[in-house]
Amino acid sequence: MSGEPELRGRAARLARLFPAGPRRAARTPFVLLVVLLLGGGLIGLLVLNSALSEGSFKMDDLQKDTKSLTDEEQALQRDIDSYSAPDALQRRARELGMVPGGDPAFLAPDGTVKGVPSPAGMPSARDAPAAVRPPEVIEAGAPAPAPGDTPTAATPTTDGR
């Protein structure tokens, strides 16, 4: 006797379905599974790294665009500020023929006039409008041309140059 009990009937039929000796699992499917998992992981990391790099480049481009647009906005705000400065407004008003208003008078709810109105002042020779200068010239500190001066092309000097 071999030391193992002899099987009969149903147990014997079931025992014939299974191999008698120790069996080793096939190695090929396991190796393929491991290789596929490692390859898939590497490809996934590559795709993720590429997507992050692309996002980083887009972010850099957007930051450059934001900086240039901010610079443009600041330049436009400087222009607005220079055009809305009181002296610039007064100069342009005089260029359009406007004169400073006189003393105002107010009409009370009962119909009485409070204050003494005076007519708008007429421009005098000292109030003559200066030559029109753009804000860039004003900011640069260039001297204003004298009233009545007109810009000319090259004015020749006495020595012929």
Image (spheres, helix red, strand yellow):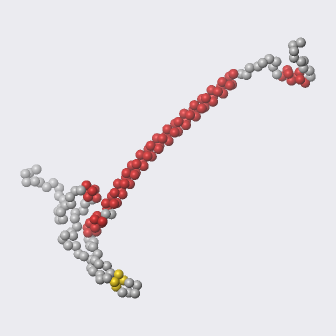
Q: Is residue 154 left or right of residue 101?
A: left
Q: Position of residue 3 (x, y in %)?
A: 87, 15
Does residue 92 appear in the picture of this structure? no
Q: Nearer the viewer, residue 19 or 97?
A: 19
In depth, the one of 119 and 114 nearer the eye is: 114
Q: Residue at x 68, y 22 (%)?
A: 28
Q: Quadrant of the N terminus?
A: top right
Q: Which residue is drawn at the image coordinates 83% and 22% (left, top)?
A: 17
Q: Is residue 161 above or below residue 134?
A: above
Q: Residue furthest left?
A: 159
User: Residue at the spot x=69%, y=25% of the render?
Assistant: 29
The structure residue drawn at horizontal position 85% and vertical position 21%, both measured from the top left corner, is 15
Residue 155, percent across and down?
13, 55
Q: How many marks?
A: 0
Q: State the image quarter where residue 23 is shown.
A: top right
Give the answer, above or below, for where 138 lies relative to 53.
below
Q: Quadrant of residue 113?
A: bottom left
On the question of residue 35 being in view, the answer is yes
55 w.r.t. 115: above or below: above
Q: Note whether 18 is above or below 2 in the view shown.
A: below
What is the x, y in percent for residue 116?
29, 83
Residue 129 is situated, as x and y percent measured from the top left of the image, at 22, 67
